Amino acid sequence: VLLLSLPLGLFVGLIELLFAIGLNDVLISSNLIDGNKKLSIISNSFILLGFIGLLRFCFVFIAQFNTNLIFEFINQKVREIIILKNYNYYDTISISKSQSFLNNISNKLAEFLNSISEIIVQSIVFFIIYFYLLKNSFSLTIYISIIFIILGVPLLLMKKKIDYFSNNFQQNVNSLIEKISKDLRNILFLKIIGSVDAERKKLLDHNKKSISPYIKYISRLTLLNQLPNLLGLIMIIIIIALNSKNNYIPPEFLVPYLYLVLRAIISFGHIVHN
């Protein structure tokens, strides 16, 4: 399933190029811009764009479905191993190790391979679009790449901070749950020695404090998810300003160029997020 990420990324990247070209042909057919159509498979540009849009939807859906399917495939495989190793008359895995595999290692491995699949797909899409942008305007693409790197560095720094806050929050919650589980197993003993009230107060205080690391984590994660959109808007303004002064690309190709730049930024955002 993971290997399917390679051809799916290739198909999605090529479909994005066709969609941008088809969009440009529709604008030309509608006399909104001047120029010559590049796709002549079907004479009606609107029908052709609709067909390409449908293909785009299908391939993006399959790519995302495949990426998410990897997550459950890994968890299913780990559960199968645990079942086979324990339900037999020979050697078995201890309860603590089985629980660790099922609750922690399984999810982390699944999340890791899920992220790898997403990175593969989005990296292929990004580079296909980027090389096409270079082909159409090397100078403009290099200029906006430099600007994008300058503006995009804070995203990478913020990603590291988010990982820190995520781990901090998870450790905080895990320690709380572990303490509750331990106390529940010994609740009768705590009642006998009269420590129930004190333990309850400690746990309630711990529970209240757990929201603070979560707020730090989720606020930065939400900001990180929204920054690519703001970055895309800034890049559109810069591209239009640079092209109006230097005419790097002809006006009839400006719309698909902007679309592909935005699509590349979205792919880059997915790469950083994973």
Image: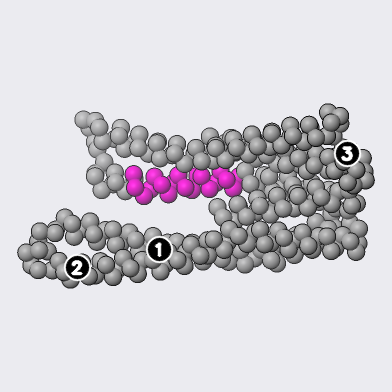
Residue at the spot x=85%, y=43% of the render? 27
Badge 3 is on which residue?
A: 29
Mark 2 vs mark 1, foreground winner is: 2
Q: Is residue 153 left or right of residue 248?
A: left
Q: Residues within 10 Å of mark 2 (few under 14, many from 20)?
A: some
Distance (Cα) linking label 2 and label 1: 21 Å
Q: Is residue 226 above or below residue 97?
A: below
Secondary structure of the residue carrying numbered label 3: helix
The x, y position of residue 167, in whole percent, is: 42, 61
Residue 109 within the magenta-colored segment of the rendering: yes
For label 2, the residue is 199
Choose mark 1 or mark 3, whichever is in front.
Answer: 3
Find out whether the residues at labels 2 and 3 contact each other: C-beta distance under 8 Å: no
**Residue 127 falls within the magenta-colored stretch:** no
Looking at the image, which residue sits at the far left? 192
**Dot 3 crowding, Cα within 10 Å, few <14, some 14–19, many 20+:** some
Of callouts 2 and 3, the N-terminal one: 3
Q: Is residue 153 left or right of residue 235?
A: left
Disc 1 crowd, CA 10 A, few/some/many (<14, 14-19, 20+): some
Instruction: Indicate which disc residue 169 carries.
Output: 1
Q: Is residue 209 visible?
A: yes
Expressed as whole percent of the image width and height from the top left, the position of residue 157 reads: 58, 66
Residue 168: in sight, yes or no?
Answer: no
Q: Residue 244 appears in which quarter of the rendering?
A: bottom right
Alpha carbon distance from label 2 to label 3: 74 Å
Residue nearest the observer in this picture, 55 or 4: 55
Residue ID at (66%, 58%): 229
